Image: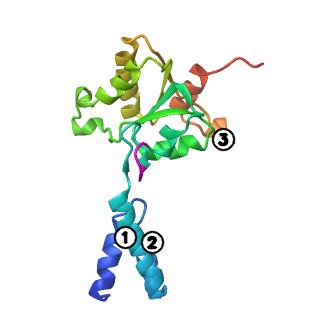
Amino acid sequence: MRLARPLENLIDRLQKLPGIGPKTAQRLALFILKMPLDEARQLAQAIVAAREKVFPCSHCGFLTDEDPCIICRDTARDRTMLCMVADSSDIIALEKSGYHGQYYALNRNFNLMDDIDLGDINLKPLNQLLAQGNIKEVILAFNPDMDGEVLSRYLAATLNRQGIKVTRLAHGLPVGGDIEFADEITLRMAIEGRKECI
């Protein structure tokens, strides 16, 4: 069925968002059409304002509207720990865990199939941060997939040469999961990462 061109355009734009398929895009577009005009304008303005005013922090890479960001300005944070992540969205997830150290986001997607040269990663800001001598441990918090594994090994080798303790997030079974439904790689990582019961 042919829809009004502005409605089709809105559906097409919404479909470009991650996790939004054709049916969800259509449902969202129709919902937006039913919104009061003032609310629709506020939504559009919020999207434009966020796109224009939010940028990565020059210190850690977290999304902010002032530099340095609120995390970097927090004097109560543990300045001896640095958690490296691939993307600033990972910082949002890790903050919910109670981690209270510093961060460093590469803000770059790593896909080995795209022939990415790991030597092209800009580590100059990271090296400047490490040169200050405060950081005692770097936690590598990358996705537990092949790309995250390769990136972790590369960075661990690079950081170990500088004499800094490098750790990784533990891998294994999720809380509430069943062993019988876990895949063999997850089970192997869980066995390798086991801890002594106290």
Query: In the image, which residues are magenta?
Result: 64-68
Kind of residue indicated by mark 1: Leu
The residue pinned by badge 3 equals: 177
Tell me how far mark 2 sits from mark 3, CA to CA. 29 Å
Of label 1 and label 3, which has the lower sequence position? 1
Main SS of the magenta part reads: loop
- Asked if disc 2 and disc 3 are in contact, CB closer than 8 Å, the reply is no
| Quadrant, the N terminus | bottom left
Secondary structure found at label 2: helix
Q: Which of 48 and 189 is in front in this view?
A: 48
What residue sits 33% from the left and 77% below the top? 10
Q: Which of marks 1 and 2 is in front?
A: 1
Tell me how far mark 1 sits from mark 2, CA to CA. 9 Å
Instruction: Please provide percent x and percent y for residue 36.
Output: 48, 87
Kind of residue indicated by mark 2: Thr
Query: What mark, if any, has residue 14 been given in the picture?
Result: 1
Magenta run includes residue 67:
yes
Of label 2 and label 3, which has the lower sequence position? 2
